Image: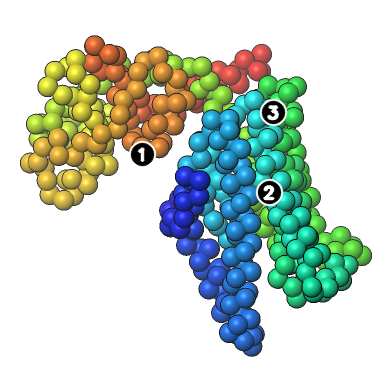
Amino acid sequence: MRWSWKIATVAGIPVRMHATFLLLLVWVFWSSLEEGSSLEKAALGVAFILAIFVCVVLHELGHALTGRRFGVHTRDITLLPIGGVARLDRIPKEPGQEIAIAVAGPAVNVVIAGVLLLVMHFSSRVYDLSDPRLYDRSFLAGLFKINAWLVAFNLIPAFPMDGGRVLRALLATRLDYVRATRVAANVGQGIAFLFAIVGVIGIPGWAPPNPLLLFIALFVFIGAGQESAFVQMRSVFDGVPVSRAMIRDFRALRPEDPLSRAVELLLNGHQQDFPVLGRSDRDPPLGILARSDLLKALAGGGAERTVGEFTRTCGTAEPHEPLEAVFQKMQESACPALPVVEPGRGIVGMVTLENVGEFAMVQAALGGERRGA
Ligand code: ZN
């Protein structure tokens, strides 16, 4: 994620902090000083926010480490002002595994809340948990309340909350995965809609309007829609080998070619990114000359320089590889295209983000026709 820095590595997983989170800390500190609090009290406010986010990191680690048991790698955990995000490489389609990973996060907060209860119970200070003012005055009681909230909030059956994943997994035991996701997303969006109504008009005689709820509703609504679209997109790729979506008709460059040759090919055809071949056609290609790199080189006044200087190494794909895996490889390496190589024969085709997108559109249209019939 842009604008985030690595602040720690826990169990081999990088923990990153988003810049906006730092702003939140500064804002809490500043606004409490502004209200006339002492320096000590303002610092305590910041410490409280940091304690909440330790709980959030532990929650995300719950997901990540449970995922690891099923062989799912977590790229990183990022702290945002609205909470944490653990980027798991994939979500297992096995309903039992998805449920275990989803439930592990809130389970961590249940444990933290339990430990806080014990500490308060055995403390010399008397904590009267039935007194609502306690939660504003005591650090421990406040943290307990937050953890109870995190459990309740995350178990709402709406994407992208953990409860939404549990619901999808339960549905997936009966329905196919794409349908299960669509139903779960619809339920999530319905709940988001209710949140929005309550956020605007409140519950008469019980709860006043709450703009925060409106914000959460928006977050849930968008998250649910994205999850559904993503799963649908992935299902289009399911079981499709690279060879079915690759371009066979392409032009290639040599590292010693001048950039002007690349410009000529770019202007004369519809190809935007070019594979750069090695000494022999049977060797794997050296990499890709991406259009963006070519334009940057030209803007820097390098029309006479060679293709080799601006070639990106992107890795390669093989014709039988699943398209989904290759698509992911391209997104991770930020390469707009990959050469498709057959061992011993050299390059046989290219996959580009564009033509994969076109393939997905065509498949979706064909699928829509099948459903309509
Ligand atoms: Zn979670």
Can residue 308 be seen in the rendering of this structure? yes
Camera-side residue of 338 and 40: 40
Q: Identify the residue at horizontal 70%, vertical 55% (top origin).
A: 112
SS class, disc 2: helix
Quarter of the image with the C terminus in it: top right
> Badge 1: how crowded within 10 Å, few (<14), some, or many (20+)?
few
Residue 119, percent from left and from top: 75, 63
- Amino acid carrying mark 2 in the image: Val
Q: Which residue is mark 1?
A: 334
SS for dot 3: helix
Is 260 positioned to the left or the right of 112 in the image? Answer: left
Q: Cβ of disc 3 within 8 Å of ligand 1?
A: no
Q: CA distance from mark 3 to mark 1?
A: 33 Å
Amino acid type, residue under disc 1 in the picture: Ala
Residue at 12% x, 22% y: name it: 279
The crowd level at tag 2 (other Cα within 10 Å; few <14, some 14-19, many 20+) is many
The amino acid on which the numbered mark 3 sits, given as a three-letter code, is Gly
Q: Is residue 78 left or right of residue 110?
A: left
Query: To which residue does mark 2 refer?
Result: 108
The answer to whether residue 287 is above or below residue 18 is: above
In the image as oriented, which residue stretches furthest toward the top? 344
Residue for badge 3: 96
